[in-house]
Amino acid sequence: MQPWPLTFMCFMLTSGLSVMSLPADTGKGRRKVVHVLEDDSGAVIVQTAPGNVVTHRGGSITLPCRFHHEPENIDPARIRIKWTKVTDMLQFEDVFVSLGRQQRVFGPYRGRVFLEQGGPGDASVVIQNVTLEDYGRYECEVTNDMEDDMGFVNLDLEGVVFPYYPQAGRYKLNYHQAEDACKQQDAILASHSQLHKAWLEGLDWCNAGWLEDGSVQYPISHPRDHCGHKDTPVGIRNYGYRQKEDEHYDSFCFTSKLNGKVYFLKRFKKVNYAEAMKACIRSGSVIAKVGQLYAAWKFQLLDRCEAGWLEDGSIRYPIVNPRNRCGGAQPGVRHLGFPDRKFRLYGVYCFRKNEDETVEGTEPIRDPTDIFKRRMNSNTMPTNITRML
């Protein structure tokens, strides 16, 4: 006898659809209204439209996935649900697997991912306390004995893209150094789609930078002679995939909503870099990272026409409402470079985390040098999950 077929569909968000909030203060997870039709044969067909599910860092989101199988009275213990993240072409990272009542969550997803359990045929999972690294494409696979099928869900984050280069200067970073530079500034390397969205919103930058897929690109909204010729069209200029070890460029970083607040520390006297770090610590905070300042500008609408130190030794200030003597006619984060750290010419931007939330790399610190230490998540895989994979 031939095995019964298993039909399966995985659905995703599109804009303009109805919204369902997850628990209070957990984010902006959005659910699509699913129209379930039944044909003359009685088979259930789920009709949906493609798109993304969208949230922000620190929020909760449902990755929606439903399946239908015949006969409908099949033993649920024979249904295996597996979620993986597509990290690169033909490379996958285990996220979650269940077989009947047995469930396992892997690596950095432990304690944050669980089945939604919305009834028969629901393979959706909920991700809590979403991180920047959670951004990307996920595969939902459902297996019934010898039959299986799969679908994909794209998880997007509300955020901001910013160009970055270190104190050493421009075009000094290979791919791995660019990746580390973004992480040190509370960000990750941006994707092409994130850079494209930023370009649509007006980002214009005349230096090529690494993206997360290993390509090198830069966005031009106002063509000019020293940025690929004045007569070339606007758009994303693409150098293609480059040698990650040997070639050097800047980076394009992406960050999302803060679990805390950035503020300009009011002082009567200007401070040098070491004094700036100590001043933030005395106020119960730490000196802000570049990504945190961009996030505050984007989501907190921080608008301050005063230059201040940041953790990387740069001087910047955020402008939401452009005005005279505040650095030009466009909103953005102004960058004044990397001055001598002994200069007492600037203020400082500090970051204070929310009391009820933990932000990686921003816990209260007594020794200023500890700011540069980062915690690592364990990626150890349980040894008793093999048969479920």
Image (cartoon, helix red, strand yellow):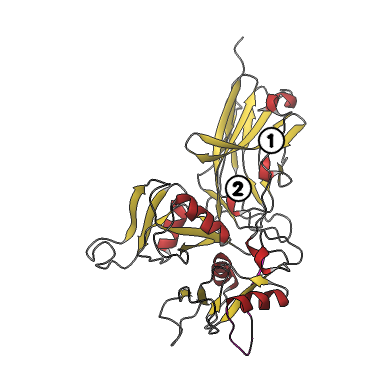
| Mark 1 surroundings within 10 Å by alpha-carbon count, few (fewer than 14), some (14 through 19), many (20 or more) | few
Check disc 2 and give the amino acid type. Answer: Val
- Image quarter of the N terminus: top right
Q: Main secondary structure of the magenta part?
A: loop
Q: Which residue: 71% across, 47% down?
A: 112
Query: In this picture, which residue range is highlighted in magenta?
Result: 260-272
**SS category of the residue bearing label 2:** loop
Where residue 6 appears, as percent x and y from the top left, is: 60, 25
Q: Which residue is mark 2?
A: 33
| Mark 2 surroundings within 10 Å by alpha-carbon count, few (fewer than 14), some (14 through 19), many (20 or more) | some
Check disc 1 and give the amino acid type. Answer: Met
Q: Nearer the viewer, residue 121 or 359?
A: 359
* Res 283 visible: no
Nearest to viewer (mark 1 / mark 2): 1
**Position of 218 compared to 297: left or right?**
left
- Image quarter of the C terminus: top right
Q: Earlier in the sequence, mark 1 or mark 2?
A: 2
**Position of 365 compared to 202: left or right?**
right
* Res 141 visible: yes
Is 227 above or below relative to 242?
below
Is 305 above or below relative to 86?
below
Where residue 173 appears, as percent x and y from the top left, is: 44, 56
Q: Nearer the viewer, residue 350 or 116?
A: 350
**SS category of the residue bearing label 1:** loop
Where residue 226 appears, as percent x and y from the top left, is: 27, 67
Q: How many marks?
A: 2
Residue at the extreme left of the image, as rendered: 231
Q: Which residue is mark 1?
A: 381
Q: Which residue: 73% across, 56% down?
A: 23
239 magenta-colored: no
Q: Quadrant of residue 171?
A: bottom left
